[in-house]
Structure formats: C-alpha cells, structure tokens
C-alpha cells in the first residue's frame, strides 16, 4: 500500500473510532509528532503501562542495533492503539499483539494497531525492530541516549508523552569490555566470550524522556554517603581532572541532603549515578538515577575562575533538584516544562549558598539569572515563560533563557509575596500530592494560592503568561521622584514588583523600597539629594532608565558605590542602557575601564570582563587593546588577568597584540591559560596569520593528549583554513545532518566559518544556513536551533547580512513562529 492510501485508511479508521468526539480531535490525532489531541486521548485510555526493552549493541558504530520492545498496557475496551516511532517503516520487522502477528498501518510516524487486534484488559504488543539512530549519540567506543523532549520515539516504538509514566525494564547486549549504566541497578550480568548480557531492575514510573542508558568504554568511581553509594562514569585520562571527582561527589551528596531536608521526602529513586561525557550536548540531563553531564563543565581546567566553580556546583544542584522537580513530579505536557526548570534553578541557587559561604549570593543571583533573562527578554524574539504547545515535536523550541532564568526571577518575587514558610509548605504539598505522577502550573498555583493572602493568579498572569519586560523611567518633578513603568509591546501591561532606590547626597545616603504595583509611583526626594540610583538591590526587573543627571554620574562614578550588590546591579543597568542604544560605546568603554582599574570583587570583575568585548569590537582601537593587555598582565585579581586574556584572544585585531598572543601561544607562556584556551588561541591565530596557519594547527594538534579532544580538534580544523574553497566545502558538509551529530563541535565550526575576520565573505552562508534551520530542529537536540542561528549570525552586523535575513523571512511568510523567534533573539544588525 502506498503511503497516501494508508493515510486515508488510517483517517477513515480514526473517523469511525472517534466520530463522536468533534472534528478538531479527528484531524490532528494522526499528525506527525504527537499532537495534544492524541496525547489526551491516550492519557484517557491507556493504563498500567510497562515497557520491556532489549538492545543488541555491536562494537562498531556503523552496525545496526537490533532490538525488541514488549509493551504492556490495560484497555477498558477494545480500541485502536496508536504508537509513535519516528523512523523508516522498514526498520519494523514484526509486530505481535497478544501473541498473534498483527497487520498494522504505519502513517506519519505512528504505528496504528487495529481495534480487532486488541482486547479489553491487558494487552501485550511485541515488536522486533532495528533501533533508530538519531538519539543514540554513537561515538567511537561509547554511545548514550538523550531522549528529551520527544526523542524516545526516534529510538523505539512507544507512547511518547510525559503523562504516560511507565515502568521500564531494560536488557542490553554489549561488547564484553564495555560498561553499561541505566536508570536502575544491574540485576543480572554475565559475559559470554566477546559479549556481555546485562539486565537492569525495573524502574519506578518514568516519563519516556527520562529513560536512558549509556554504554561504552568508561571508567567507574564510587563514593559512599552514609547508606547511599553514588557512582560516577567518565572517559577522562588526565589524573588531575579525575581527582576532581572528590569534590563532584561531595556536591552531589550535599545537594541530595539539602533537598531531602527541604522537601521532607527521601531521595525518591533506587540509585544515583552520574555519567560525564565528552561532546555531551547540554550541561547536564536529569535522567532518573543516571544523570548525564558534559565533561568540560565538570572537569575544570587547572585554574578555574570562581564563576566556573559556581557554575559547576549550580549545575550539579540543578540536575539533582530535578530528581524531585521533574522526575518525581513531572509536567503534564511540555508547555509546562518551565515548571521543572524554574524549580531546578531556583533550588540550585539555594543549595549552592552554603557550599560557597564567602560568596555574595544576592549578587550572584542577579549576575546569573537576571542578566541572562534580560538578554533574551529585550530582543524582538522574546517569549512568555509559559507558551502554548500544540504538538510535542515543537517541544524543543519552548526552551530558552526565559524559562531557565526569567522564571527563577519571577519565583523569587512569588516567594517574597507569599513568605518563605508558606511557600515551603506549598512545595511539600505539591510533591506529595503528585508524587510519581504529573501536574500543571495551575495545579501548583492553586496549592500556593490557598496558602497566601495575595492574588497569585493575577501576579502569575502577567509574569508567566505574557512576554517582555517593562521599561522603568525615573524622573524628578517638584521634589518628588516619579517612577513610571511602560510596556514596550504597547499592551499597557503592569508588572507588579518591588526594588530599592538609593538617594545620594554629598554625605548622605537614604535607601527606600519602591513598591511599583501600578503604572507609576512617586517617592519624596530627601533633602540634599544629588543622585538617584535605581534598583540598588537588583530585585527589580526591566530596563531602568535613570534621570539624565544620574546617568552622567553613573558613567563616571558607578565603580565608587561601596555596596557590592548595588555596584553589580548598577553595572547591569548601564549595560542595558548600552544595549538599548541610550549610551554610546565610547562612554560605556570608559565606564568599564574605570571599573577594571578598581574592582576587587571577582564576580563583578568577571561581569566587567564579559562586557568588554562588544564595545572593543565596535571601537576597534589599538590603544584600547594595549591598555587591556596591560591590565591582563598586572591586574591584582588572578581571575581578571585570565578573563582579560581570554577577552583579547577572542577580540584582539591589532597586529601588535596578535603578535604578542602568538608569542604566548608558541611558548605556552601564560600560566593561567588551559589547554582549551591554547586551542582557541591557535584557531584565532591561524585565522589572523594565514601564512602560519599550517604550523600553528600542526603544533597545536601535537599538544593535545586526550583522543576525544584530538577528534574535536580535527573536526574544527576543517574550517580553520585560508582556502575559501575548503571553507565552502566544510560549510556544505555542515548542512548535512550526519556531520552535525556532535553538536558542540558543529556549533564551533559554524562560528569560525562566520568569524568577524570573514564577515564579508561569510554573508553567503546566511541564506543556506537559515534554510536548514527547520531540519536542524528536527534532527538536532533542544538548544541546537538557537545555537546554530547564533553561530551563523552573531558576528554579522552588516546591511548585506540584514538583507539576507529579511529576504529569508520574505521567502517564507509562513515560517514557524517559534523558530523565527530563535533567529530574532540572536540577530544584532546596525551600529550601536
Ligand atoms: Zn533542567
């Protein structure tokens, strides 16, 4: 039967089956992906779901993986059953239902089992098939599954939706020398010659996106935490890096203890392992009992900055918090995926606090969450925290800075409104009510609302359901300070919030809390005030536009503000004003340099260093680079010297500084630079000095010991060439999905193809690069579409480039709004 005939057949069958349920329901139930209609229908009818899975994994990564799935579930009556499998039809070898070989239809990524084959009560569907490869991440010597948000269906037939939780029992056949890890402990393991057979214990009820296994040549380490044993698997060969497992284990244990104490619920799964992998797409992924981590985020270089150490701890705490928030209680549908991310990040910050007692955590929180939320919320491509999702295949596009970073900012405000104790009680009730099940944001707000005097639903509506941020303008009038918020999207929305305002006089300082619950609020200005500093506690969210006098004062004196949180918040306010083009690159650069000269707090200093690149590129003066070089040599803060060096590596253009960088690279003479820094430096130098490209790349390759990192180097090296023909060929290769399978490598290669030095030449990559973005979404993982767009566009600021992007949108008037917003979040055209 041809595909179209099958589709018509299936539709007709669907009409018969759900004829009474309304037309929209019928139309979308067989759509590609998993429509919300299909998910709702299955949620109502499929009960007591269990999967038995077996994969036979060969040593060679290009050999097929043969597999079996045994899917058991209970039906209240005989009915058609729709399974998901996003692969070619010929990978399905045989399907039996209740013991009988079954004729089925395969339409739009669905296996459709006819009603006659099923029965009331328990049904058993047995499928022999070849596993789909897309989400198996097969590398030399290891593979790992990464199935979030809807990729289980690319590997094996299943009911892919987060609210059909199931017990999984997994069996693996692997080469005898390999290790294998999954969500639960090994129950049976035996080796027969070249092959090892492993059966894992059944899991607790899991959503498909949390099921996972890793197999390959891995080293194993163990840590005892009281009664609990935590295991780690990795591929690192450098002894100094491996030694960092001690601190990693301690932080995992500390996170588990904190969460058990706070939630009152003991760790809800049978075991805890972490697997640290090179080339892993994300920072981490919270597979129940088997969390995956990216090796560069876990094994830090020899001189990690405080930011890097904090980021590692926050990542560990984030993934561990997911065991309760996401794994134990899971969102009902992926539109609420932010509910798990907001808790993971909110609690990550709190878990990290006692582990770094010397750090100013209020400052760190605005530096992390607020800054990153603003960076997306200020763009024309921004979105609300909660977004609609009609089909699971678009779930990956829901993710972004807004759900990870704006949501915790919102959560802080919510806790502030409710009070800490009521919030904690609400969280405990939420976790106990929905344990091993699913919940929506509305379920949570209903619990919290009952414990609060305030109208949380109204608060949630503007902060959660609406996109964008307020512009908050301060004006002096008749001895009063007027604070007015406006909605840049013209909807007249009001974001209720509180923040501090500090009135500075010659020798007076008065701080007042502004309660901005309406469009505006007026505060009396104390006698003797000369300067009015907005948002000095950083709790406020939006673009703060100070009075003209204050702006002038800030540009010259922000660095003199003694309170560190206020100093960080004011620095960020200046940065937002620079982004909004309310101040120019020259005065902004001067303000930054004043800070570099005097800053003693390492977190503020690192913020400063991260801000330098943009105006440096815009101004492009050799004198500035020389000045930064001087700071990079003499700054009293080690991390500042290191970060300034990194800033110069990425941004320096003048022959003099490039020459000095070459000397540093040749002699490997900078004590604070890591192997990764030297590799990045080699790429940059090879682009700046085409006559030395061959030498630089050859020498750098010979310096790398770890074979996984040599492979990465060889991949990126394809684009580090003065030969434009070779560049074009490398770009063409990147357009093919199989050459993008290690996403961090592909991202890096695309970034260097569009390096600032190649800005003019690379304009021609923009159109074809955008044309594949839909495919990048289909074949890549969650964060990749934005990363791809960013790698392609971040260094293009020309009018030609802008025209290319506009022409692309004009040619695709019906382009997916979610993907379009990813592009609009990264473009930055025109001079500031
Ligand atoms: Zn997360």
Image (spheres, rainbow, N blue to C red):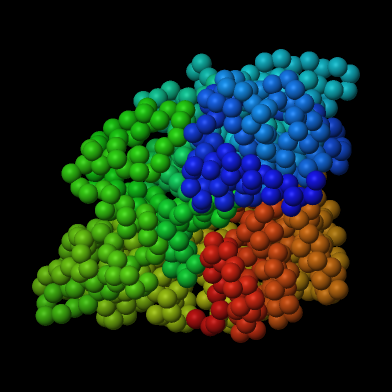
Residue 263 locus on image (x, y percent):
37, 29
Outermost right residue:
193
Give the vertical position of 536 relative to 126 (above or below).
below
Instruction: Give whichever of 779, 632 is nearer the camera.
Output: 779
Instruction: Give whichever of 502, 278 is nearer the camera.
Output: 278
Residue 320 locus on image (x, y percent):
50, 35
Give the quadrant of residue 560: bottom left
- The mark total stands at 0
Question: Residue at left 52%, top 38%?
Answer: 41
Outermost bottom residue:
799
Residue 176 locus on image (x, y percent):
83, 24
Instruction: Give whichever of 272, 209 is nearer the camera.
Output: 209
Give the vertical position of 172 relative to 208 (above or below).
above
Question: Residue at left 72%, top 58%?
Answer: 746
In this picture, residue 77 sits left or right of residue 388: right
Instruction: Give whichever of 195, 244 is nearer the camera.
Output: 195
Does the rendering let one see residue 280? no
Does the rendering let one see residue 522? yes
Give the vertical position of 63 relative to 748 (above or below).
above
Residue 185 locus on image (x, y percent):
63, 20
Give the vertical position of 724 relative to 178 (above or below).
below
In this picture, residue 257 sits left or right of residue 79: left
Question: Residue at left 19%, top 73%?
Answer: 482
Question: Residue at left 68%, top 34%?
Answer: 113
């Amino acid at each position: 039967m041809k595909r179209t005939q099958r589709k018509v057949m299936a539709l007709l069958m669907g009409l018969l089956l759900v004829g009474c349920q309304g037309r929209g329901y019928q139309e979308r139930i067989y759509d590609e992906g998993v429509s919300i209609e299909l998910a709702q229908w299955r949620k109502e009818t499929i009960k007591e779901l269990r999967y038995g899975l077996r994969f036979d994994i060969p040593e060679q990564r290009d050999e097929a993986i043969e597999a079996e799935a045994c899917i058991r579930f209970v039906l209240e009556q005989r009915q058609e059953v729709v399974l998901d499998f996003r692969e070619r039809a010929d990978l399905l070898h045989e399907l039996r239902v209740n013991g009988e070989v079954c004729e089925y239809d395969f339409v739009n990524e669905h296996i459709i089992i006819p009603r006659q084959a099923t029965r009331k009560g328990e049904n058993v569907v047995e499928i022999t098939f070849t596993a789909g490869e897309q989400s198996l991440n097969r590398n030399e010597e290891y593979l790992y599954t990464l199935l979030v948000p809807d990729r289980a269906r690319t590997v094996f037939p299943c009911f892919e939706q987060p609210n059909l939780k199931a017990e999984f029992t997994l069996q693996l056949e692997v080469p005898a020398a390999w290790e294998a890890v999954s969500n639960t402990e090994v129950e049976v393991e035996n080796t027969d010659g070249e092959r090892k057979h492993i059966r894992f214990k059944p899991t607790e009820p899991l959503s498909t996106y949390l099921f996972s296994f890793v197999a390959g040549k891995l080293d194993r380490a163990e840590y005892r935490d009281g009664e609990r044993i935590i295991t780690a698997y990795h591929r690192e060969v450098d002894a100094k890096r491996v030694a960092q497992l001690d601190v990693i284990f301690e932080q995992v244990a500390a996170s588990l203890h904190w969460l058990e104490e706070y939630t009152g619920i003991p760790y809800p799964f049978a075991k805890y392992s972490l697997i640290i992998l090179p080339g892993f797409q994300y920072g981490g992924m919270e597979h129940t009992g088997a969390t995956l981590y990216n090796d560069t985020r876990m094994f830090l270089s020899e001189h990690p900055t405080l930011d890097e150490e904090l980021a590692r701890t926050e990542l560990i705490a984030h993934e561990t918090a997911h065991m309760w928030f996401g794994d134990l209680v899971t969102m009902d549908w992926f539109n609420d995926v932010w509910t798990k991310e907001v808790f993971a990040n909110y609690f990550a910050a709190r878990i990290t606090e006692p582990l770094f007692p010397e750090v100013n955590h209020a400052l760190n929180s605005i530096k992390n969450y607020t800054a990153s939320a603003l960076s997306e919320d200020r763009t024309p491509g921004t979105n609300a925290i909660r977004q609609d999702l009609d089909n699971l295949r678009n779930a990956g596009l829901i993710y972004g800075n807004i759900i990870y970073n704006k949501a915790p900012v919102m959560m802080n405000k919510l806790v502030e409104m409710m009070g800490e104790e009521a919030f904690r009680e609400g969280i405990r009730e939420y976790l106990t009510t929905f344990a091993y099940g699913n919940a929506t944001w509305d379920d949570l707000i209903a619990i919290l609302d009952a414990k609060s005097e305030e109208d949380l639903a109204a608060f949630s509506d503007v902060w959660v359901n609406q996109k964008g941020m307020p512009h908050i303008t301060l004006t002096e009038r008749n001895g009063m300070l007027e604070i007015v918020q406006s909605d840049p999207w013209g909807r007249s929305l009001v974001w209720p919030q509180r923040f501090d305002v500090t009135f500075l006089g010659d020798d007076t300082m008065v701080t007042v809390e502004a309660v901005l619950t309406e469009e505006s609020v007026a505060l009396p200005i104390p006698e003797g005030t000369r300067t009015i500093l907005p948002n000095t506690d950083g709790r406020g969210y939006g673009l703060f536009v100070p009075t003209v006098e204050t702006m002038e004062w800030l540009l010259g004196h922000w660095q003199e503000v003694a309170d560190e949180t206020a100093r960080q918040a004011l620095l960020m306010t200046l940065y937002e004003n620079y982004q909004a083009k309310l101040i120019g690159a020259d005065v902004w650069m001067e303000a930054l340099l004043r800070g570099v000269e005097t800053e003693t707090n390492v977190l503020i200093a690192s913020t400063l260093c991260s801000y330098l690149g943009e105006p440096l590129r815009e101004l492009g003066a050799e004198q500035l680079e020389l000045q930064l070089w001087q700071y990079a040599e003499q700054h009293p803060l080690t991390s500042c010297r290191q970060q300034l060096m990194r800033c110069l590596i990425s941004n320096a253009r003048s022959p003099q500084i490039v020459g000095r960088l070459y000397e540093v690279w040749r002699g490997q003479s900078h004590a604070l630079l890591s192997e990764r820094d030297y590799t990045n430096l080699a790429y940059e130098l090879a682009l700046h000095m085409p006559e030395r490209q061959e030498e630089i790349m050859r020498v750098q390759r010979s310096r790398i010991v770890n074979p996984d990192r040599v492979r990465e180097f060889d991949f990126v090296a394809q684009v580090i060439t003065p030969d434009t023909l070779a560049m074009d060929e490398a770009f063409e290769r990147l357009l093919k999905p199989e050459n993008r399978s290690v996403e961090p490598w592909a991202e890096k290669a695309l970034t260097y193809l569009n390096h600032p030095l190649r800005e003019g030449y690379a304009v021609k990559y923009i159109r074809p690069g955008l044309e594949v973005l839909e495919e990048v979404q289909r074949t890549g993982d969650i964060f990749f579409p934005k990363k791809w767009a960013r790698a392609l566009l971040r260094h293009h600021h020309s009018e030609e480039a802008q025209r290319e992007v506009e022409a692309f949108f004009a040619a695709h008037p019906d382009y997916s709004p979610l993907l379009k917003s990813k592009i609009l979040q990264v473009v930055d055209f025109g001079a500031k």
